[in-house]
Image: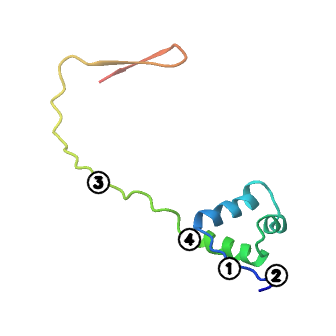
Amino acid sequence: MSKDKQVRRRWSREDKLAIIGEIESFGGSLADVSKKHNIDRCLLKRWIRQLSCEPEEAEAPSVFVPVTISVPEPASAHPVLIEVGLSNGRSLTLSS
């Protein structure tokens, strides 16, 4: 067995993303990252292609909530005033 023989390594998805992240986030070049991790540049390019095509983790599905609509009560003889305080110190008064 020679010293030049490479042992096949297995990379988890998280490891691949972390290594590719070094290229994208830290502005490292493909060549620098491949040398640092002793990975062929073609393999890194393949990982980038494969992982960029994967769908993002699925978001939680939309949920419909039942809504009950009631008939409004008849307007009262006296108007209802609503006062809204604004952040600039002013107030806004609305009438029903």
Instruction: Indicate which disc residue 4 carries.
Output: 2
Q: CA distance from mark 3 to mark 1?
A: 50 Å
Instruction: Please identify, in this view, whether the residue under mark 3 or under mark 4 is nearer the observer.
Output: 4
Q: CA distance from mark 3 to mark 4?
A: 28 Å
Dot 3, how many residues are within 10 Å of its Cα: few (below 14), some (14-19), or many (20+)? few
Amino acid at the residue labelled 1: Arg
Q: Residue at x 50, y 14 (%)?
A: 90
Contact (Cβ within 8 Å) of mark 3 with mark 1: no
Q: Residue 60 placed where, x, y %?
A: 40, 57
Q: Residue 40 placed where, x, y %?
A: 78, 76
Q: 64 or 86: nearer the eye? A: 64
**Mark 3 lies on residue:** 64
**Mark 4 lies on residue:** 54
Quadrant housing residue 14: bottom right
Quadrant housing residue 10: bottom right
Q: CA distance from mark 2 to mark 4?
A: 34 Å
**Mark 1 lies on residue:** 8
Q: 80 or 70: nearer the eye? A: 70
What is the tally of numbered marks visible in this picture?
Answer: 4
Q: Quadrant of the C terminus?
A: top left
Instruction: Please identify, in this view, whether the residue under mark 3 or under mark 1 is nearer the observer.
Output: 1
Q: 49 or 43: nearer the eye? A: 43
Instruction: Please identify, in this view, whether the residue under mark 2 or under mark 4 is nearer the observer.
Output: 2
List the single residue furthest toward the top. Answer: 89
Q: CA distance from mark 1 to mark 2?
A: 13 Å
